[in-house]
Image (tube, coloured by chain):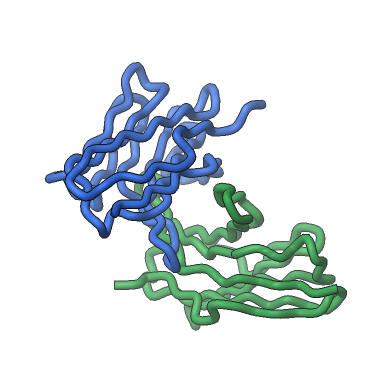
Amino acid sequence: EAGVAQSPRYKIIEKRQSVAFWCNPISGHATLYWYQQILGQGPKLLIQFQNNGVVDDSQLPKDRFSAERLKGVDSTLKIQPAKLEDSAVYLCASSLEGRISSYNEQFFGPGTRLTVL
Amino acid sequence: DQQVKQNSPSLSVQEGRISILNCDYTNSMFDYFLWYKKYPAEGPTFLISISSIKDKNEDGRFTVFLNKSAKHLSLHIVPSQPGDSAVYFCAARGTGFQKLVFGTGTRLLVSP
């Protein structure tokens, strides 16, 4: 079974530029997550999709970050314009559609390391 | 507001000995706890979990203990192996849609 795919693996941009990341989840996984991991910290959830719909984007800086999941499969995360503090690893994860009473393991991709100069 | 804390940024253990990684949390509404392992340049991978209704869960060399009254959990690795060297993240699930809150991680180094 193929894992979660992400691209690019590395990206270097200057502040105020735009950048986009792509994620392809595990086939059949209805739930998709984007996390931001700043150096020395744990992953922080930015946005969670259940199929096409957003179920949690409370920690997404909506003035500069946007995400979409067309057709309930692939997803893109965009930053426009980027700031120095956006330097981090952006992780995508996916899981089976889960009921509140059970837990479905989240499978993570390798991440995209973003450096903003 | 750090709801999940891993106060030890690093731990060094000799091969064959026990590794104990600790995690504290503040939110009593967390109902599921997990440990993830992360190698450099890779995403975290699930290791072991425990429901809040249990106090112990074992899987091979890995055991997770949960002390709800102390809001504390720990991961025991026995015996430790050099391949266990990685960063270990504790995570907790809040109520609702599977949202995980991660700790800051503990880097484990197992030396031969």
A109 over B26 or under it: above or below: above
> Where, quadrant-wise, is the N terminus of chain A in this rendering?
top right
Q: Residue at x 68, y 77 (%)?
A: B20
- Coordinates of residue A34 in the picture (x, y in percent): 38, 42
Would you say A72 lies left or right of B35 here?
left
Q: Is residue A30 visible?
A: yes
Would you say B18 lies left or right of A30 here?
right
- Coordinates of residue A8 in the picture (x, y in percent): 45, 35
Q: Residue at x 75, y 70 (%)?
A: B77
Q: Residue at x 31, y 34 (%)?
A: A20
Would you say A62 lies left or right of A109 here?
left
Q: Residue at x 48, y 34 (%)?
A: A6
- Coordinates of residue A89 in the picture (x, y in percent): 42, 51
The one of A87 and A68 positioned closer to us in this rendering? A87
The one of A85 and A72 positioned closer to us in this rendering? A85
Chain A tint in image? blue
The one of B54 and B38 positioned closer to us in this rendering? B38
B25 over A58 or under it: above or below: below
> Where, quadrant-wise, is the C terminus of chain A in this rendering?
bottom left
A27 over A36 or under it: above or below: above
Q: The chain shown in green is which?
A: B
Q: Quadrant of residue B78?
A: bottom right
- Coordinates of residue B11 in the picture (x, y in percent): 65, 79
- Residue extending furthest top? A71
A57 over A77 or under it: above or below: below
